[in-house]
Image (cartoon, coloured by chain):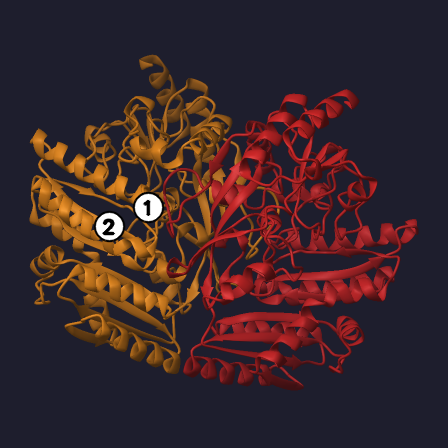
Chain colours: A orange, B red
């Protein structure tokens, strides 16, 4: 192995410019972890390709020397996806950060994988367009495709998988393919787009992505609704959705998390369970939606309802929600973030959140609950002291209880963060024999097992039964 | 081979009741073709399983004797999907035709594969719900999933792949898996749902499907707009979409097809290029959408615009559109239907339809043009006399020209009908090296090549370069 990586690095140095490859300890450390609690592992070297051809040649070199390859966007993942568990080469896409082409009349944009979400939206704004997938973090588009990210707006605009129309993908042996086309739909061949989105770097590297974009709505109204209990808030959401109101965002933030929001963003929101909502539409339709929602929320014990239509006030409201994870991290120096991520049918939400709150209390863990309640996806945010074994074990126990609850009710162990390292042990329980199909696909496309090894697929010895 | 199939049939007769297996020539003929021009081939036997366990055992028997298996819904496919090209066993799902469970508060319904679209919607109506994927034909849900069907409402509600949440799938060796969960989204493992939807019976048989359903909108308005040219009509559509109006359907029917509609449905619509539209929403919003659309259509030379809000009048309007293919078949006894099915970026639509019309005239073929213009998907309908070699060749030439045009502009050879037999020769040109990935997946999941053989994947010797 030692020799293999040294030989590969020598060939990579011949291929790339001096500043496109690094073995500097600081650079290796930066690529050893993401934003999660998972144990860091440094790669042997980091490469910074500038184009598809270089990525293809890097993959060929790695393939010929049997060296593991781990793609790296910005390291904002939450389940250890970018940790190069078996060392080898990390491919950092930060030099491939161009918005290549905006086809505004076709509602399409082509980007390189290193483009970030806010960078893309800044460019799209020139055309009156926006890209709606918004996981909170200012992640790269390549990373968002790798984990099948979603976030606050997905209840209305869909998840990453539904908004990627085509990708240029470099396979394990360096072959370059396209996974889709520019057509809005296709029944031609197997759905490779859907397969590669969410594949977490285990089937190939993305070098170009064509995304579906949307016109900025004529009118946007945001709202913040306070409740005396999480149950009431969740029941109100369920009623709004069942009434067919096309909400663009509908998020829950519990009491504990509202405290963090206030502290971090210097705000004075009431520290009670709160719904953050947004409505998009034409003026007349939106007003009818807002009025109807107000009526429903009232029926479910809403204590206070504030609307914001001005851009600045809306942005402040959403910044507070978006900064929640950072608020936790900021408020707990020296600790590491663990976030649960189950997703369930909407009728199971109230019970699931109730169960999670009970589990937190039983285990004596402090933690906040927040979630994309319109999709049935919620998170418990925990700040863990990794040096305290008992605390780590309690956090793992909490995660397990929450996952078990979700799986027993038709849900999934991860709604949007992905499997990475942290959810591998639940894969067998969630997928059963379908996991064998996934393993066969992995084996067929990456027979040497070099692409982001020890991720996504399950570890038999650790599997939860 | 003879012996293999005889042995398999003997085992199947021991497994199934007498009326669940047939070698009757009339039954074999019924399963030898779909609604298209492709050459019929009868299976050796047809089985009618009643449950998942029987399907699994049928697959095990077929696997052990190396006998091909072709799933059959109602035979309404348009590219020869159900033709058992290599003979063997056809599995007819007509006994598995139950709507198993409606979870109305979760907007989910679980069905068996033999349930038809209208049967499902009749059941859902009891709950104020509907399933929006509407390919025109009253196909089975299993068949619609197999071809990744879409149709008139997909511009608003998405295609089959986006509305299937979970499937029970029987694999080549009889293993039963689930491809998804009941959660609205998931980042857990590879996206098997997306892979199996559109796999045309080449990767497994579907035995249960959980679908996303929608509340029947508060208000529905239909409209019919006449234009003096197809170009003007398509430009009007593009403008409506670019203005961000959330149309639920927007269909084009050209002059020749309007004649067929009038003849078949005994109507007196003006025989000029016509847009059929539908708007769904709340009362206030919908009125604003309708007013805005009227304004835009006027700017693009709309000759006449008629709105219908009454259910009966709306249904008559859509029945006329839906019956179009039958109108052609009915109007040309003894001939066979060939339908082109390309899909392109919306800005390429006007050029593509113009090119298709020119190609029809150059080749001296009569044919109507219609399409789901909001998705960039249009069809040329041709009635061919299969006994006239020159006519068949001309029709093939037309199809080729239309596909070439679409592929050269970022489109796909099939927007919704699927590959089947008719689009295999375009697979290499459309997908390039991505086809090798598809072949590897097929090889991994069906190593003996028994599931609907000679479909979907390309024939090297026939491939269009």
Residue at 62% in and 43% down: B200
Residue topped by disc 1: A409
Element on which disc 2 rests: helix
Residue A444: horizontal and vertical position, in percent?
51, 27
- Quadrant housing the N terminus of chain B: top right
Question: Between residues A16 and A312, which one lies in front from this camera angle?
Answer: A312
Q: Is residue B130 visible?
A: no
Question: Between residues A302 and A155, which one lies in front from this camera angle?
Answer: A302
Q: Quadrant of residue A374?
A: bottom left
Residue B359: horizontal and vertical position, in percent?
79, 61
Residue at 64% in and 83% down: B302
Question: Between residues B137 and B432, which one lies in front from this camera angle?
Answer: B137
Residue topped by disc 2: A352
> Are the residues flagged by discs 1 and 2 in contact, CB closer than 8 Å?
yes
In whole angstroms, how far apart are the C-alphas of marks 1 and 2? 9 Å
Question: Chain for mark 2?
Answer: A
In primary-sequence order, the first of circles 1 and 2 is 2
- Quadrant housing the C terminus of chain B: top right
Q: Is residue B368 visible?
A: yes
Residue B338: horizontal and vertical position, in percent?
78, 55
């Amino acid at each position: 192995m030692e020799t293999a990586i040294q030989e590969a690095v020598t060939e990579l140095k011949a291929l790339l410019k001096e500043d496109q490859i690094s073995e500097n300890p600081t650079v290796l450390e930066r690529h050893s972890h993401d934003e999660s609690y998972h144990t860091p592992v440094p790669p042997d070297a980091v490469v910074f390709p500038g184009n598809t051809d270089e990525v293809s040649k890097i993959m060929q070199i790695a393939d010929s020397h049997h060296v593991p390859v781990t793609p790296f966007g910005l390291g904002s993942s939450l389940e250890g996806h970018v940790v190069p568990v078996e060392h080898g080469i990390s491919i950092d896409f930060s030099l491939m950060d161009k918005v290549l082409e905006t086809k505004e009349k076709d509602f399409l944009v082509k980007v390189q994988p290193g483009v970030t979400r806010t960078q893309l939206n800044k460019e799209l704004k020139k055309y009156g367009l926006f890209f709606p997938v918004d996981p909170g973090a200012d992640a790269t588009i390549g990373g968002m495709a790798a984990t099948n990210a979603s976030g606050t707006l997905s209840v209305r605009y869909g998840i990453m998988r539904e908004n990627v129309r085509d990708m240029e993908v470099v396979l394990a042996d360096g072959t370059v393919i396209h996974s889709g086309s520019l057509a809005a739909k296709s029944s031609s061949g197997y759905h490779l787009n859907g397969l590669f989105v969410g594949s977490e770097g285990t089937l190939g590297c993305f070098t170009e992505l064509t995304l579906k974009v949307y016109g900025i709505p004529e009118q946007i109204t945001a709202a913040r609704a306070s409740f005396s209990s999480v149950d009431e808030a969740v029941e109100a959401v369920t009623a709004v959705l069942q009434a067919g109101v096309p909400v663009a965002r509908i998020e829950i933030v519990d009491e504990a998390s509202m405290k963090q929001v206030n502290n971090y963003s210097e705000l004075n929101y009431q520290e009670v369970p709160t719904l953050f909502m947004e409505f998009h539409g034409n003026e007349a339709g939106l007003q009818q939606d807002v009025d109807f929602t107000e009526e429903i929320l009232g029926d479910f014990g809403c204590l206070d309802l504030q609307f914001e239509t001005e851009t600045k006030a809306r942005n402040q409201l959403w910044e507070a929600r978006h900064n929640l994870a950072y608020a936790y991290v900021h408020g707990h120096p020296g600790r590491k973030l663990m976030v649960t991520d189950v997703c369930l049918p909407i009728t199971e939400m109230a019970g699931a959140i109730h169960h999670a709150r009970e589990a937190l209390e039983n285990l004596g863990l402090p933690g906040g609950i927040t979630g994309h309640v319109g999709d049935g996806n919620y998170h418990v945010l925990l700040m863990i002291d990794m040096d305290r074994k008992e605390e780590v074990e309690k956090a793992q126990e909490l995660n397990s209880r929450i996952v078990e609850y979700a799986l027993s009710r038709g849900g999934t162990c991860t709604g949007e963060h992905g499997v990475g390292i942290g959810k591998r042990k639940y894969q067998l329980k969630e997928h059963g024999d379908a996991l064998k199909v996934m393993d066969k696909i992995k084996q067929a496309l990456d027979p040497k097992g070099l692409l982001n090894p020890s991720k996504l697929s399950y570890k038999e010895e650790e599997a939860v039964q």
